[in-house]
Amino acid sequence: MTLAALSPSSSERTLRWKMAFLVGSAIAISYLDRQTLPVAIKAIERDIPLSAQGFAFLQSGFLVAYAAMYAGGGWLLDVLGTRLGFMLIMVFWSLACASHSLAANFAMLFASRLLLGMGEGGGFPAATRAVSEWFPARESSLAMGIVNAGTAVGAVAAPPLIALVLVYSNWRWVFILTGLLGVVWTFWWRSTYFVPGERQDEKTMQIPVAKPSWLSLLRFPEVWGMVAAKFLSDAAWYFYLFWLPKYLYDARGFDIKAVGSFAWIPYAASGVGCLCGGWFSGWLLQRNFSLDASRKWALGASAIVMPCILLVQQVPVGWALALFSVAYFGQQSWSTLVMTLPTDLFPVGAVGSVAGMVGFGGAMGGVVFGQLAGYLLDHGFGYGTVFMLAGSFHVIAFMIILLTIPTVKRLTLDKELLPTQVGTA
């Protein structure tokens, strides 16, 4: 049992939300870091020329490393614990971000992108584990919404901040300054975060310390369902995330200042989606809907708005930004809920590993679709074809969730699936 399972005092509830804000700020930094290259791409291309396929390779390099470390990072967090593990992960990715400033050619830029992906891959498993340590089911979706809203804060801040740096300096300073921000965060984390159970009398606790292996977790169809759903939904999301500035440059004639002025709008909508998705599911729970119904109604509502992206090419740029905003809203509402499911289905000792596998699936979806998008755009198919594919993915993903997770409830892990079983105090 953790602090989340106890009857909390007002001060304990306040502390919970402070922890959610702390974790969300790290996710904000991660999204600021990963947006540096897409937003600064026009300035970088003056020194390092890139085709659409070359740009896709840079993003795929990030995502392949991100996927590997998402899975490995989840396991690492289960071994090292949230506090130490998240600190090491943040230091690594911050230095990797700063290393972009040293790139003199495509190979060096690609290597930095790989290192950044390796570091950032551990971020969401750490965030998911922190939520599971601090929040009960009735609050976990909103807590994950606050954490996931960090994606919007970082993405909203990226276009204007990067544009400002580019006005007064060169693109290399963009990476130095964003890397430094992550290093500063580690001091805040080190002095603030703790696992609730570590400050309670051990005689009053039962700590779930058994850590099932990946192979044993893959016996659950629910894991495969979440991985497949995340593969599809994140295929669309990473395309929107990495390609929106380039789309505005290439198809809508924006310059760096215009991207800095307007590209933040869909990302702001994504932050609202994070909060609304988590809030709506929690609101349903408070009105005596089952956990299963609360999660699935909210997931379905998120998925149903995503096909709006099919209309982007047929409308003026102002309406296109509005449609992107709706899609970003729906995507991040969806993502908040999908990343809450591991905390609903599995005990704390398995949450990091499950979240890691789910995130691995999502990142690989981004790799596959990113490469496909680069190929289609370089071979004359245009953005309309890419949007047509991306607009269908969330609906299919929701159907997979319904088929593979008949009921959202805590699963029982058989003792023979647990390689390490430690008695409770």
Image (tube, grey):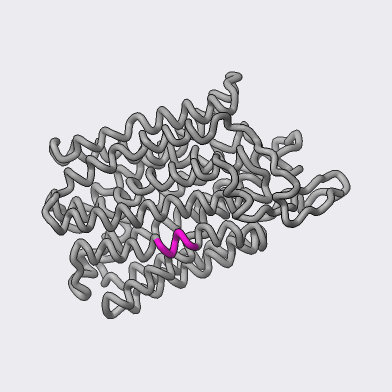
Closest to the observer: 119 or 274?
Answer: 119
Image side of residue 255 versus residue 214, left or right: left
Is residue 68 depicted above or below 296 in this figure?
below
Name the spot of residue 252 as percent of width and height, x first: 13, 49
Q: Is residue 420 visible?
A: yes
**Residue drawn 73% across and 36% down?**
8
Q: Main secondary structure of the magenta part?
A: helix
Q: What range is drawn magenta here?
A: 64-68
Name the spot of residue 225 as percent of width and height, x first: 49, 41
**Residue drawn 36% across and 53% down?**
366
Q: Quadrant of the N terminus?
A: top right
Image side of residue 78 versus residue 258, left or right: right
Residue 319 on the magenta span: no
**Residue drawn 22% across and 36% down?**
310
Across the whole image, how many numbered discs are drawn on residues? 0
Is residue 370 depicted above or below 166 in this figure?
above
Quadrant for residue 334, please give it.
top left
Is residue 77 depicted above or below 227 in this figure?
below
**Residue drawn 55% across and 41% down?**
221
Name the spot of residue 369 as percent of width and height, x first: 30, 52
Quadrant for residue 166, please give it.
bottom left
Closest to the observer: 39 or 366?
Answer: 366
